[in-house]
Each structure stands twice: as structure tokens, then as C-alpha cells.
Image (cartoon, grey):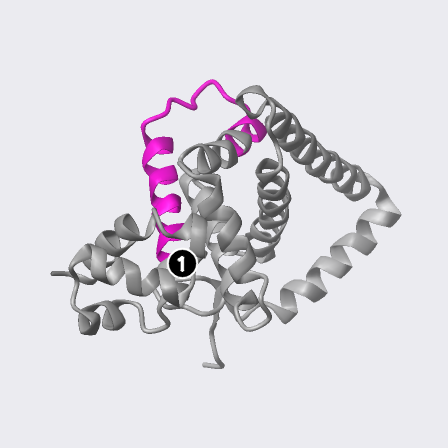
């Protein structure tokens, strides 16, 4: 049985326990028993127990989003509409809000915060990749950082939204994306200004110089950082 299969069985078994016991050791042990997976194999697949299982749950949601986006015709959509669709799709593939709510609690703990941040960054990265992003410079980072903020805020709003069909959440999402687009328009106007544009280009040059050896993530699993460092030749 592969690690992926083990995690899938554990997640299926954990679904009925998480709403009551959270992503906890109690849930992890119950999932092992219910799934009929040996403790040794379960611990090998999830060395940190419930934390790794919660991350596997998040990654499964990301993959479900990517699959659905690949099956959706986006040819007539504006770019901002495609971004909104991706975020909305990521939330729509979630079957139980309580699983996410409990995950927010888990990853708000100081020792788990880095894992939560990486998970959100990973979602933003998968969204941009699914939308065909090919940026290689500092824009690779700023796009994902901005979308991480939009996604995180939208998830928090969605968790408390009881409107019909989550209409209020989708309106909130549209406002967040519109706000980002307005910033981009202001940046474009600034670049068109002879004086301010020169200052912006100078600042961007300094940032690019600092990050010139930083490359986008290779996509390998287990990469702890949002990118990778290319050392001196």
C-alpha cells in the first residue's frame, strides 16, 4: 500500500472524528483503528500524526480544485474572473466546513503556524500554475503572496457565512480581487509617470538584484520554502 493510499484511508476514517475531536491525537488513533491500517504504516505516512493528516487533507482539496479547473472552460473569462473562479472552486470542493474550521484551530498554534502558512502558499501556487502563470522574477513571489492573503481572508469569511449559496462570500471575494486589481492599475499609472516611474524601476531593480538567485519552487514535495536558492556559480 502506497503512502498516498494510506493517507486516503486515514482521511476517510478521520472525517467522522475531526468535527468532534479536531485534528488531534485522539482522532488520529481512531482513524488508524477504523481504517484498519497498522500503526507502523500510519506513523510512517504521517510521522507527526494529526498534523500531517491535516496537511494531507488540505493537499487533497488542492488537487480536487486543480482537477475541477482543468475540466472548466475558462476561455471567455477575464483574468480576474479566472482567479475568483479558482478560489471559489477551492472552497466548493470542501464537503465539511468543520474540517476546515478545526484545521484553522490546529494551524493557529505557534508550533504549527509555519505549516499552515506553507499550506496556504501551496494553494496559491497551485492556483497560479493552473492559470498558466509563467513568471520567473519577483512577480512569481508577489503574485502568490497577494493571492495567499486573498485566499486566507476569504476562507475566514466563508467559515462564518450562512448566506444562501455562500453568496456573501463570493461578493467578498470579488471585492478583495477588485481591490488587488485597483492596486495593479495604480502601479501601472505610476510606471507611466516619468519621475515616479523611474523611482519604481529603481526600487524593482534593487529587489530583483536581491532576489536574483531566488528561483520559483521546483515543485518537489517536501520543499520547505516558497522558492529555492541558487548559490553562486
Residue shown at 61% from the left, 32% from the top: 161
User: Image check: 71 left or right of 232?
Assistant: left
User: Image check: 102 left or right of 148?
Assistant: left
Would residue 163 be seen by someone viewing this image from the given angle?
yes
User: Image check: 169 left or right of 52?
Assistant: right
Secondary structure at numbered mark 1: helix
Quadrant in the rendering for residue 49? bottom left
Quadrant in the rendering for residue 169? top right
Depth check: 169 or 34 in front? 34
Quadrant housing the C terminus? bottom left
Depth check: 209 or 152 in front? 152
Depth check: 83 or 25 in front? 25
Quadrant housing the N terminus? bottom left
Q: Dot 1 surroundings within 10 Å: few (below 14), some, or many (20 or more)?
A: some
Would residue 134 be seen by someone viewing this image from the given angle?
no
Give the x, y percent position of residue 224: 45, 70
Residue shown at 88% from the left, 48% from the top: 195
The extreme left residue here reads 1
User: Image check: 131 left or right of 29?
Assistant: right
The span shown in magenta is 55-83
Q: Circle 1 sits on which residue?
A: 55
Magenta highlight: main SS: helix
The answer to whether residue 209 is above or below residue 146 is below
Give the x, y percent position of residue 17: 36, 52
The answer to whether residue 193 is above or below residue 108 is above
Give the x, y percent position of residue 128: 48, 44
Residue shown at 46% from the left, 54% from the top: 122
- Is residue 154 in the magenta section? no
Q: How many marks?
A: 1
Amino acid at each position: 500500500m502506497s503512502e498516498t493510499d494510506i493517507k486516503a484511508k486515514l482521511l476517510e476514517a478521520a472525517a467522522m472524528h475531526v468535527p468532534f475531536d479536531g485534528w488531534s491525537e485522539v482522532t488520529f488513533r481512531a482513524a488508524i483503528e477504523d481504517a484498519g491500517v497498522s500503526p507502523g504504516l500510519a506513523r510512517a505516512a504521517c510521522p507527526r500524526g494529526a498534523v500531517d493528516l491535516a496537511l494531507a487533507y488540505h493537499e487533497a482539496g488542492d488537487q480536487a480544485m486543480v482537477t475541477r479547473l482543468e475540466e472548466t472552460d475558462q476561455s471567455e473569462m477575464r483574468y480576474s474572473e479566472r482567479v475568483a473562479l479558482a478560489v471559489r472552486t477551492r472552497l466548493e470542493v470542501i464537503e465539511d466546513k468543520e474540517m476546515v474550521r478545526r484545521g484553522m484551530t490546529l494551524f493557529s498554534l505557534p508550533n504549527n503556524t509555519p505549516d499552515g502558512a506553507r499550506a496556504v502558499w501551496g494553494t496559491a501556487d497551485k492556483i497560479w500554475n493552473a492559470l498558466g502563470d509563467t513568471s520567473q522574477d519577483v512577480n512569481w513571489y508577489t503574485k502568490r503572496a497577494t493571492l495567499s492573503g486573498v485566499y486566507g481572508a476569504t476562507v475566514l469569511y466563508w467559515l462564518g457565512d450562512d448566506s444562501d449559496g455562500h453568496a456573501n462570500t463570493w461578493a467578498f471575494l470579488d471585492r478583495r480581487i477588485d481591490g488587488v486589481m485597483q492596486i495593479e492599475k495604480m502601479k501601472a499609472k505610476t510606471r507611466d509617470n516619468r519621475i515616479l516611474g523611474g523611482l519604481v524601476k529603481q526600487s524593482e531593480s534593487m529587489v530583483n538584484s536581491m532576489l536574483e538567485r531566488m528561483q520559483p519552487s521546483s515543485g518537489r514535495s517536501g520543499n520547505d520554502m516558497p522558492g529555492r536558492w541558487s548559490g553562486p556559480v
